[in-house]
Amino acid sequence: MASESKVESNAQSNGKGSIAFHGMSCPLPLQDYPNVILGHGGGGKLSSELVEHIFLPAFDNSHLAGLGDSTVFDVGQGRMAFTTDSYVVQPLFFPGGSIGDLAVNGTVNDLAMSGAKPVYLSAGFIIEEGFPIGQLKQIADDMGAAARAADVSIITGDTKVVERGHGDGCYINTAGVGIVPNEVNISPDKARPGDVVMVSGTIGDHGMAIMSVREGLEFEAQIESDSAPLNQMVADIIKACPEVRVLRDPTRGGLAASLNEIAVASGYGIVIEEPSLPINPTVESACEILGFDPLLVANEGKLVCIVPGKSADDVLSAMKSNPFGANAAVIGNVVAEHPKMVIAKTMIGASRVITLPIGEQLPRIC
Amino acid sequence: MASESKVESNAQSNGKGSIAFHGMSCPLPLQDYPNVILGHGGGGKLSSELVEHIFLPAFDNSHLAGLGDSTVFDVGQGRMAFTTDSYVVQPLFFPGGSIGDLAVNGTVNDLAMSGAKPVYLSAGFIIEEGFPIGQLKQIADDMGAAARAADVSIITGDTKVVERGHGDGCYINTAGVGIVPNEVNISPDKARPGDVVMVSGTIGDHGMAIMSVREGLEFEAQIESDSAPLNQMVADIIKACPEVRVLRDPTRGGLAASLNEIAVASGYGIVIEEPSLPINPTVESACEILGFDPLLVANEGKLVCIVPGKSADDVLSAMKSNPFGANAAVIGNVVAEHPKMVIAKTMIGASRVITLPIGEQLPRIC
């Protein structure tokens, strides 16, 4: 890559094979990576370091410091949420969905997790020269259908084309804006001991769907992505429990990453009962065969919900009455013990620490 | 590409080497392109066809139909503008700027052209495995500096990493939201006969800066990109002339594309006096040597402004008092003759039609 030579003049070498960043001290392992590795995009520790050490210092502002999936800001009379996500999933079409509905549902869900009602999306395409127009139309149609299903509109867009060999078919970025009801105040730091932790359905479906099609694996039943819009479910949850504490969609990094974020942000511990985790049996078998931990596998149509104990039954009913929440389940509790740590109790009564994944278990998942 | 085979099953062949789209009749030349070509990203006719025939039908909504660079929508008490752009410029660093400040200025300018005050940006990165962290930091720092200069904040972001060979160093998407003052109503269809057409400075600087560094060309003076935020200039213009009709930033496709868009949207003709066009002499020489028409070359820190004739002097003064408007000039008029066409009067008194470029004069320009 022609750019390799440039970094040597831009960054001072500290003589130990790593680089020193101007104007900041950076004691964390990022220094050990002079170049980006796949794990920097994996939603785990390496991703966090990239954000903390490269982007936060550069873009310095109080909104960004929240590090949520979307950012809420005041505008005139109301509050709005704003989010962005790029989609680089490979293959572009997979059982249960395509990059098109993923690009809409993913951004709709990021807005919904801050309690916002998603309203408008943008769509930015980076297309490789030679990409079949028929596939582009299929992707655009999938986006349109997903937007109608989620009751949002794609109102602005942009298309760039790069030369053959400099992209990978089609990348999509969507940004989204939503309106946050005044009474809503949902964020990962709101979890409190005694709160109940729930998921809205089976975990690991999206990641294993991608994995099985990418590796050409066949199981008894086809594993389908769970790609779905969760904004209506969020509205139902808020109606059942206006004081809902936390909502997260466990995408890259899976449930493990979301629960760790919540534990760290709130300063409390989380205990989950592993036998309570809803998992599709085919997904469970596939994970066992391939050596994946379902807690680390991406979901694209599931949410984690933390609510005060007294509201748990109402919220569970609300989730179960939604078409995407039939398998919703209580999976654990927020506790005062082991602050900032997530512990899973296994079927045989043992405990294991669930850590934030370091890098990338499965690249190009969304 | 593995996806080539897929289009054949997704799209019906009409037996003439082109594809038929399901559920739409498509009599335009898009049918002749079964695959995306570079020109589909060039901001010219091919880009328009892609938007009209693929994206507009799929995303169907009244906001999008305006086809502006950003979209204005009502939210509670106020009006907001929303826009997105992906940046794939090559090389990433060039005289006068980098992909970083381009990604901020470009989106700031798209918002400003609808009369909005840009407020918040998102940033989505698609980074190739192996990209030097030092360069990523330089890009992020450039974005931060550009955001501060334009008085906007980057408040949400996302990072994806793709495998080596499936990207090109670093692609950036920024989306932006801005607040539109109630009295402002600026759009390309507002041009009227008798209005005056102005540009805010020399044209073609950005495109020729990229071209010269990419081709290793050396001229007497180095050509620098004009990448700059234009939101303050727009505020000054609106102050000098609240009834300003049209603002556009002539990026991909150059001044020719912007003027043609305005002519088509308004239904009137535009005449420009070619000798009045401000052009940096080095850029003019470079264009002559390389066979480029400066009217078609991209700008990243210039605007076209159309105002009622009586306000022309005030607006010209306002532009000239801005640091990025020193070379602002009146270049022509809106006329009732030759509707929807742009005519240039040359130095020797001849007239030539300025058409919308078909495809890509210079790919990867922004």
Image (cartoon, coloured by chain):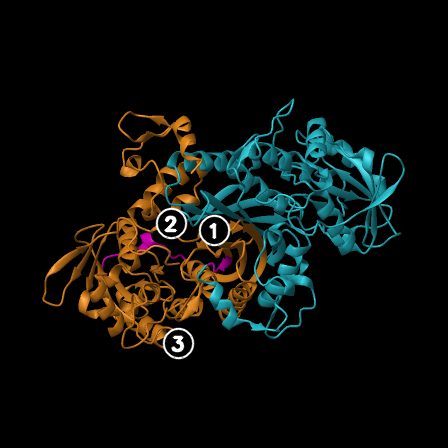
Chain colours: A orange, B cyan
- Image height check: is A312 above or below B348? below
Under tag 3, what secondary structure?
loop
Res. A323 mark: 3
Under tag 1, what secondary structure?
loop
Chain for disc number 1: A
Disc 2 to disc 3, C-alpha distance: 36 Å
**Quarter location, residue B228:** top right
Callout 1 crowding tier (Cα within 10 Å): few <14, some 14–19, many ≥20: many
Q: Label 1, on which residue?
A: A167
Q: Are marks 1 and 2 in contact (CB under 8 Å)?
A: no
A83 sits to left or right of A304: right
Mark found first going from the N terminus, 1 or 3: 1
Residue A97 in magenta stretch: no
Residue sitting farthest toward the front: B16
Chain for disc number 2: B
Q: Main secondary structure of the magenta part?
A: loop
Residue type of the residue flagged with mark 1: Gly
A182 sits to left or right of A319: right
